């Protein structure tokens, strides 16, 4: 084998030098006006139970490499829904007049509007509306519309299919279970849980024993069976079977930290929303009939305005309270 002298190998090219000697070629980006945006702007949406309310989720996606601008979104919801909170929080709500003023069955609706200056290429915008029903056994529909200016300065519009919606009716039959079954029922993997917590805006002293009895009344008026009741701690457990869906339901009613609360558990989340809505509506009617409040406007939801968590207590008038989940402060009533 012939060995080369050091000075003879000095000028040979090494393999790593071969790669280093090449300059990387810069990729020229396609001008935005030539990007094809056809069928690349779309919306994904759904309506699902979320605790004691419904979540309408809308995802706007720009799957092109160019931005769209002047994005305007309209979401039409039934008038029997109220908006608890939303993300993003900046929006406007307007009532819509029925198409036929002579049709008494015409569904009253309102629209939620929001705008964005730009949605960049290969990005998306998530919109969440947390909707609380006010009435039972009502039919309605939810649909969304969007307009935007594309990369060629044309106005485009797309919309979603209509979600037809009806709140489930229910009919409870009393059912007795041993106390030992309560914990077992709550721990079943398919059991869903939901709650409603309210405060009464009154300058007088809250008679917690009286309000606890009113909570018990609203539950028993719906034909639930009392399982156990603790008058000292002002909490009671109730049970029943819904004859419409066939689902068992466990209900807990309590007065805690000046909060009036109902908690419900079942495998049917839609049923829970209907039951809790009925409890709150019945309680409001009783409070007005008995002269404790003038109108339902004196009944305040104790869900956090930012995350939906139940607030730790019902604060005094004009006082702020901090959510123990998201740590945001808020004033419940003023």
Image (tube, grey):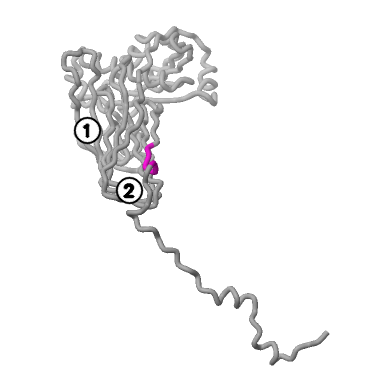
Residue projecting furthest to the right: 1
* Residue 303: quarter of image: top left
Seen at 35% across and 36% down, the residue is 128
Give above or below for 122 relative to 324. below
Residue 252: give x, y in percent of width and height. 41, 20
Q: Which residues are magenta?
A: 39-43
Residue 234 appears in the figure = no
Which quadrant does the N terminus fall into? bottom right
Which quadrant does the C terminus fall into? top left
Q: In front here: 6 or 199? A: 6
For the residues marked 2 and 1, what is the alpha-carbon distance in whole angstroms?
22 Å
Q: In front here: 286 or 189? A: 189
Q: Secondary structure at mark 1?
A: strand
Give above or below for 244 relative to 153. above
* Residue 250: quarter of image: top left
Residue 161: give x, y in percent of width and height. 36, 28
Q: Which residue bears the numbered disc 1?
A: 93
Residue 95: give x, y in percent of width and height. 19, 27
Seen at 28% across and 32% down, the residue is 75
Residue 119 tag number: 2
Residue 156 tag number: none
Residue 83: give x, y in percent of width and height. 28, 30
* Residue 294: quarter of image: top left
Name the side, left or right, on which 248 lies relative to 301: right
């Amino acid at each position: 084998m012939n060995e080369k002298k050091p000075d003879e190998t000095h000028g040979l090219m090494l393999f790593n030098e071969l790669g280093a000697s090449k300059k990387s070629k810069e990729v020229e980006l396609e001008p935005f006006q030539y990007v094809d945006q056809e069928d690349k702007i779309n919306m994904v949406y759904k309506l699902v139970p979320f605790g004691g309310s419904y979540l309408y989720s809308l995802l706007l996606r720009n799957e092109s490499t160019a931005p769209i601008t002047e994005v305007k979104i309209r979401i039409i919801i039934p008038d029997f829904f109220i908006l608890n909170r939303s993300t993003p929080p900046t929006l406007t709500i307007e009532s819509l007049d029925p198409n036929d003023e002579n049709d008494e069955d015409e569904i009253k609706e309102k629209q939620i509007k929001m705008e964005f200056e730009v949605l960049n290429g290969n990005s998306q915008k998530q919109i969440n509306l947390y909707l609380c029903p006010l009435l039972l056994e009502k039919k309605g529909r939810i649909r969304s519309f969007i307009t935007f200016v594309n990369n060629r300065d044309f106005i485009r519009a797309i919309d979603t299919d209509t979600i037809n919606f009806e709140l489930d009716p229910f009919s409870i039959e009393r059912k007795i279970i041993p106390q030992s079954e309560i914990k077992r029922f709550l721990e079943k993997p398919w059991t869903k849980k939901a709650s409603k917590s309210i405060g009464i805006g009154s300058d007088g002293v809250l008679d917690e024993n009286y309000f606890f009895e009113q909570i018990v009344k609203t539950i028993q008026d719906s034909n639930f069976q009392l399982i156990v009741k603790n008058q000292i701690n002002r909490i009671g457990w109730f049970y029943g079977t819904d004859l419409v869906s066939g689902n068992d339901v466990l209900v807990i009613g309590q007065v805690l930290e000046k909060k009036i609360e109902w908690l419900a558990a079942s495998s049917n989340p839609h049923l829970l929303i209907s039951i809790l809505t009925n409890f709150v509506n019945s309680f409001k009617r009783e409070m007005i009939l008995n002269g404790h409040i003038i109108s339902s406007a004196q009944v305040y939801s104790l869900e956090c305005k930012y995350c939906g968590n139940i607030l730790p207590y019902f604060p005094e008038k004009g006082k702020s309270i901090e959510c123990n989940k998201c740590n945001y402060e808020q004033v419940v009533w003023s």
